[in-house]
Image (cartoon, rainbow, N blue to C red):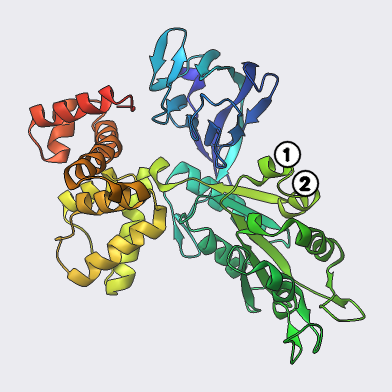
Amino acid sequence: MRDREPTVSLDAGPLTLRIRTVTLHVIRGPDTGRAVRVEQPTFVVGVGDTADLRLTDPGVSREHLRVLIGPSGVRIKDEGSKNGTYMGTCRVHDLSLAGDTVVTIGSTTIGISVEGEPIEIALSASDRFGEATGVSTAMRHLFAQLERAADSDLTVLIEGESGVGKDLLANGVHGRSLRRNAPFVVVDCGSIPENLIESELFGHERGAFTGADHARQGALEAASGGTVFLDEIGELPLEMQPKLLRALEAREVRPIGARAARTIDVRFVAATNRRLAEAARTGDFRSDLYYRLAVVKVTVPPLRERPEDILPIARAMLRALKQDATADYPADYASMLTAYPWPGNVRELRNVVERYAVLGTPTLDIHQHAVAMMGATDPGISLLSYQEARQIVLDRFEEAYVPRVLERANGVVTKAAELARVARPSFYRMLERVRASGRKA
């Protein structure tokens, strides 16, 4: 119906998007009774760490179902799950909702209610935040949240898959804040050995332990007046979390071996590739620390969910590398970039762009890149014969590539074949193979 269409409205202030809110309620299955209200452009249901609603049903995939709220209304989209998404006996791949709906994934039944009154979410007027680029509704909403947060000293938690650019966003928060002329100190909690993390964060006095030949200032003190970025905060050992919590609450640290605490003046920004709320719920992360970190929480969607961002990001990278504001890609190469699902996100895209910039001609075959990436993720691939391994990798590529091209072509096979630059019968055979494998297409 017409009154369900979200509209972008220009006010005296920033852009806003009027969207319907959606409530998901588990009515059957291992997680019966769980409910969540969705007030963001994209929301994931699954059993993986990256799911917004994380279920325990073994018949549900890691990222099984996605709820999308945007200019075309509310949609649900199966994410290529193994067991599918069903409305009654009908398998659903991509469906626009006209009202309340009940779907089944695995042995779990979920009621989806589209609420009557829309809410307004802010959109940034810019497609850049620091060094991060994004033209999609999801990213411009995220930019708007960070723009507001940057003006304050509120603690910010940035969640998202590896490679989505969480570090760029953290740096952007610092760069837009009143602390921008003070230090920006990065602590990678996932790469520091457990026996060194306390010293890295809080410092130590000379002689505090064997090998401490001189005093060392910790990252929280080193960032005085500025921002400390706690990357991969989800990997911080549980035994270290109470001490970080005290630093957040009291704004003071006590170096190892020191007799007295020292006051710190620092802004905290943290990032993780885990869903910390779920980790806190299961006891894998302290809930009190989570709530202190997530004063402002944003989730960066993976690149595969926002294909409209791929070319703007790739162009920005290329132009910066070549120092040429007009540098661009040939149309066919741009189409291949857009069609690829980018499992390594922006980091993987940067690798491809850097190679393209050095070669200077579109000789890089994105299909070969995809095959290399997908083959490398399976350590057992080397145990197979060449022909067997090659077939598995090609199958995986088709499963990732074909649905994306078909989506760009609005489901029209002839148009999809043109975009893929293959004959229509060849594309149709690929499509049939993907459908036979149980993947979405």
**In this picture, is 145 found above or below 168?**
above
Whether residues under marks 2 and 1 lie with C-beta atoms below 8 angstroms apart, the answer is yes
Name the spot of residue 302 as percent of width and height, x first: 45, 46
- In the picture provided, is 136 more to the left or to the right than 354? right
Name the spot of residue 195 as percent of width and height, x first: 70, 71
Q: Secondary structure at mark 1?
A: helix
**In this picture, is 148 found above or below 25?**
below
**In this picture, is 72 found above or below 126?**
above
Q: Is residue 326 visible?
A: no
Q: Secondary structure at mark 2?
A: helix
Could you tell me which residue is drawn at 51 percent across and 16 percent down? 104
* Front in this rendered view, residue 10 or 255: 255
Query: Residue 118 lies in what quarter of the image?
Result: top right
Could you tell me which residue is drawn at 25 percent across and 45 percent down? 384
- Residue named by callout 1: 281
- In the picture provided, is 380 more to the left or to the right than 384? right
Query: Residue 402 lies in what quarter of the image?
Result: top left
Q: Name the residue type under label 1.
A: Arg
Could you tell me which residue is drawn at 54 percent across and 45 percent down? 141
- Residue named by callout 2: 287
Name the spot of residue 334 as percent of width and height, x first: 22, 51
- In the picture provided, is 86 more to the left or to the right than 181? left
* Front in this rendered view, residue 329 or 425: 425
